Every structure is written in structure tokens, then in C-alpha cells.
């Protein structure tokens, strides 16, 4: 319930005094919530001048009005409002924020966090190491991520120092999994997951200690963990493949050829790709699709062409496989969905590998759309922000004109026919 009489509150909340209260709120929030100083209003309307005259108890003339906040505070206290300026502002709007005090408190909290970091470093095996000063300076420059409380920041810094102390111990001989290390320090196996603040702090320290740049991609970050004998998760993410027949007599090459002989798809993990170079026969074109159903259909039909599936997004393990194949001379042909995300993914693959578009022209799109319409297949509306196709300037306009999205399954019979053709 308002502490202001209803009629008084209604008058004070009127539009003619809105600029006064807005300016007074800004001034009090910036000066320690003190009713001091003055406020100048310019281009004052006749209605504003009239209400300001009533509020201040004196006639006002001219297009500009200067209001002393201490006088306004006193006037409000002795008026029907019966409250000071701060109380009136909080009756008319949200509570005032003492921004000066908040800044001072934030500065004090930052100092406490920095002091805690320095104390943790001094008490750790890292004390005195040349790179530690640069690591600490970098942390001060980057600051604390938004939303992280000072208490959480202190705890995270302490955990980072603890992890680095373990990993960079010159007498350490044993390797460990990243999940195990995280659980031992944070209590959670996900405490050092890629992208977490703690993981970034530790990775920056590892990079500085080893005189290397902080990697910008997931593969580089995994390599950084391996540099200190920490095994990242390299088995949960997979890339779906079919028909890969690498040359060579190592067990992986033989296994892939045998699965291809039996028309069996293969899921390869990042771990599978660590120590192997999949060298396909010279001149091999690897087809790339977006949807697993294409792999399934190719296997059912006994397709003879090698096929790699992005499963809707070119995850790190997918790019790792394609990078490996590209480095050994493979060429690529790409097909994906005819929607805007599909074109964005196609652009990425085609740019990165110089892949040839595979049934991905404007003519291909219009043919499939016409066929679907003739077969009375329900149309899927095209939604989202348009994306231009780097390989065919006419594709995006054709898609926008028809407004129909076509998933890869719409071309499944044509793709399977291609994959069954002579390699």
C-alpha cells in the first residue's frame, strides 16, 4: 500500500512531472542517494511549468527550470506528500540503487578475489614460476564472467590453481582422464568440460607453461589436454560413415574394408582418428550427406561409393575425419537439406574442402519441389533468415520464391542411385 495519499500520488505521477522524477532518480542514484545538487530541465512545456510551480511553491517563467534537490526534498516533506525526495521516488517507481556504493562494493569484491588468487598461488607449487605472473595478469584483464559471484570466482580460481599444480608437477608420471581429474577437484565429472570457465583458466595456464598459443577449436583444446597427460572424452562423439575402404594392412584399415564388404555402416570416434591416416585409393570421391537416413538407404541398396554423414551439423569429429581424408588426397561431393540451415552447412563444407555440390542446384531444388507437389506430399514451409549458396547464385532466390523447405529424404532415391553407380 502506498504511503502517499491517493490524490497526491496521482498528481505526482502525472506526465508533467515525469522528467523531474527521472532526472532526480538518476542524480540520487549517482551521488550516494543524497538530495544534493541541482537539476536543470530545458524546453519546459507550459503544463510542466504549471505543475512545477505548484510543486515548488513559486512562480516559474522561461523555457528552462533549475531545481535544487535539497529544496525539493524539504518542499515534499512539508507538503501533502509528507515524505522526502527519496521516499517519493520509491513510491512512484522501483527502489533507488546506490550506484556509487555498488561500484565501491564491486571494486572491493574484485580486490578480495585478486587477493585470494594471489594467496592461492603463493601457497601452491606454482609459486615463483615465470609464466604464472602472465597467467595471473591475464585473469585480471579478462575479469570474472557475468553472473559469477565473488564466492564462486574465489572457488574457481582455487580449483584452477589446484589443477595446474597437479598437472604441471615435474614429478608426475601418471595419466588421467579429464572427467576423473574434474571429479577429484570439483566433485563433478563435468567440472572441466569444454567451454567451462574453469577449463578455460586451466587451458590458458597449460598453454603459457608450455609456451604455446591457446587453441581456438575443440581439436586443439583436446591436444592441449593430452600435452599434460590428460585424456579428454574421445569416445562419446562419433561420425557415421559407410563404404570407407582405406589402403593399408593395419587393423583399422582391415576392419573398415571388412565392414564395407558386408555393407555395414561404421561409427568412428575421435579416438579412432587420433593415430590413423585413412588413406583411400587415389582419386576417390567421398560423398557427404547431412542425414543418417541416406547412409541407411545406401547400405540397404549396397552402395559402392564411400559416404560420410554430418548428422545435421559438422561436429568436431566429423571435421576431423574429413580433414584426414582431405590430407590424403580424397575429393568430396556434398548434399544436404534445402533449407536455410542446410545451405549454411553446405557453404561451410564446400568452402573448407572445395567439395562439389551434389544434386544441390536451383534446378535440382525446383525439380524436387515440383515432384513433391505432383505426388501431393505435404509442403514444409521455408522459415528463418535466407542464406545465399556459394555454389549457385540462383538457389536461394528459387527457394525464397517457392517458400518450400525440402529435407534430404526428398531426394533419397536419386542419391541412392548415385551411390550405387560405378565408383
Image: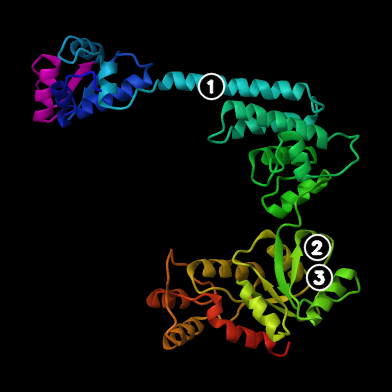
Can you give x and y, in whole percent of width and height, for residue 292 in the image?
63, 72
Near mark 3 (Cα within 10 A), the count class, few <14, some 14-19 or many ≥20, is: many
Q: Which mark is residue 257?
A: none
Q: Which residue is mark 2?
A: 272
Query: Is residue 319 or residue 331 the one in the foreground?
Result: 319
Q: Which mark is residue 107?
A: 1
Extreme-front residue of the structure: 1
Query: In which quadrant of the rendered view does residue 207 lie?
Result: top right
Q: Residue at 70% across / 42% down in the picture? A: 192
Mark 2 or 1, which is nearer the eye? 2
The residue range painted magenta reads: 44-68
Q: Which residue is mark 3?
A: 278
Residue 406 in sight from this viewpoint: yes
Does residue 129 belong to the magenta stretch? Answer: no
- Residue 338 placement, left or right of 312: left
| Quarter the C terminus occupies | bottom right
Can you give x and y, in whole percent of width and height, for residue 302 in the image?
72, 85
**Mark 1 or mark 3, earlier in chain:** 1
Q: Residue at 14% across / 25% down in the picture? A: 11
**Mark 3 or mark 2, earlier in chain:** 2
Query: In which quadrant of the rendered view does residue 58 lie?
Result: top left
Mark 3 or 2, which is nearer the eye? 2
Residue 134 in sight from this viewpoint: no
Q: Is residue 129 above or below residue 396?
A: above
Q: Is residue 223 above or below residue 316?
A: above
Near mark 2 (Cα within 10 A), the count class, few <14, some 14-19 or many ≥20, is: some
Q: CA distance from mark 1 to mark 3?
A: 55 Å
Can you give x and y, in whole percent of width and height, for residue 74 in the image?
21, 9
Amino acid at each position: 500500500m502506498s504511503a502517499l495519499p491517493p490524490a497526491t500520488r496521482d498528481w505526482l505521477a502525472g506526465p508533467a512531472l515525469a522528467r523531474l522524477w527521472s532526472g532526480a532518480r538518476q542524480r540520487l542514484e549517482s551521488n550516494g542517494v543524497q538530495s544534493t545538487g541541482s537539476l536543470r530541465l530545458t524546453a519546459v512545456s507550459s503544463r510542466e511549468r504549471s505543475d512545477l510551480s505548484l510543486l515548488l511553491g513559486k512562480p516559474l517563467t522561461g523555457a528552462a527550470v533549475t531545481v535544487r534537490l535539497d529544496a525539493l526534498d524539504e518542499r515534499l516533506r512539508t507538503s501533502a506528500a509528507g515524505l522526502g525526495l527519496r521516499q517519493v521516488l520509491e513510491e512512484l517507481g522501483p527502489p533507488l540503487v546506490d550506484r556509487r556504493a555498488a561500484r565501491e562494493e564491486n571494486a572491493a569484491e574484485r580486490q578480495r578475489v585478486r587477493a585470494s588468487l594471489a594467496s592461492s598461488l603463493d601457497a601452491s607449487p606454482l609459486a615463483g614460476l615465470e609464466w604464472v605472473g602472465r597467467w595471473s595478469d591475464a585473469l585480471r584483464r579478462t575479469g570474472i564472467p557475468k553472473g559469477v559471484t565473488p564466492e564462486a570466482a574465489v572457488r574457481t580460481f582455487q580449483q584452477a590453481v589446484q589443477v595446474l599444480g597437479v598437472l604441471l608437477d615435474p614429478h608426475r608420471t601418471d595419466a588421467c582422464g579429464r572427467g576423473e581429474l574434474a571429479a577429484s577437484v570439483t566433485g563433478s565429472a563435468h567440472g572441466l568440460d569444454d567451454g567451462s570457465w574453469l577449463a578455460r583458466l586451466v587451458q590458458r595456464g597449460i598453454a603459457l607453461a608450455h609456451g604455446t598459443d591457446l587453441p581456438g577449436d575443440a581439436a586443439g583444446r583436446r591436444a592441449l589436454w593430452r600435452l599434460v597427460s590428460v585424456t579428454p572424452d574421445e569416445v562419446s562423439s562419433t561420425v557415421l560413415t559407410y563404404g570407407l575402404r582405406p589402403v593399408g594392412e593395419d587393423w583399422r584399415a582391415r576392419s573398415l574394408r571388412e565392414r564395407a564388404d558386408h555393407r555395414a555402416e561404421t561409427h568412428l570416434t575421435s579416438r579412432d582418428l587420433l593415430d590413423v591416416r585413412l588413406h583411400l585409393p587415389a582419386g576417390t570421391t567421398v560423398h557427404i550427406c547431412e542425414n543418417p537416413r541416406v547412409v541407411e538407404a545406401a547400405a540397404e541398396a549396397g552402395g559402392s561409393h564411400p559416404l560420410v554423414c554430418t548428422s545435421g551439423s559438422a561436429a568436431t569429429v566429423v571435421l576431423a575425419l574429413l580433414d584426414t581424408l582431405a590430407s590424403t588426397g580424397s575429393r568430396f561431393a556434398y548434399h544436404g537439406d534445402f533449407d536455410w540451415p542446410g545451405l549454411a552447412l553446405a557453404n561451410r563444407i564446400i568452402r573448407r574442402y572445395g567439395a562439389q555440390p551434389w544434386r544441390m542446384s536451383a534446378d535440382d531444388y525446383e525439380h524436387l519441389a515440383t515432384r513433391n507437389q505432383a505426388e501431393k506430399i505435404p509442403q514444409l514451409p521455408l522459415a528463418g533468415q535466407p542464406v545465399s549458396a556459394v555454389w549457385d547464385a540462383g538457389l536461394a532466390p528459387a527457394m525464397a520464391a517457392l517458400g518450400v523447405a525440402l529435407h534430404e529424404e526428398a531426394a533419397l532415391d536419386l542419391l541412392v542411385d548415385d551411390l550405387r553407380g560405378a565408383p
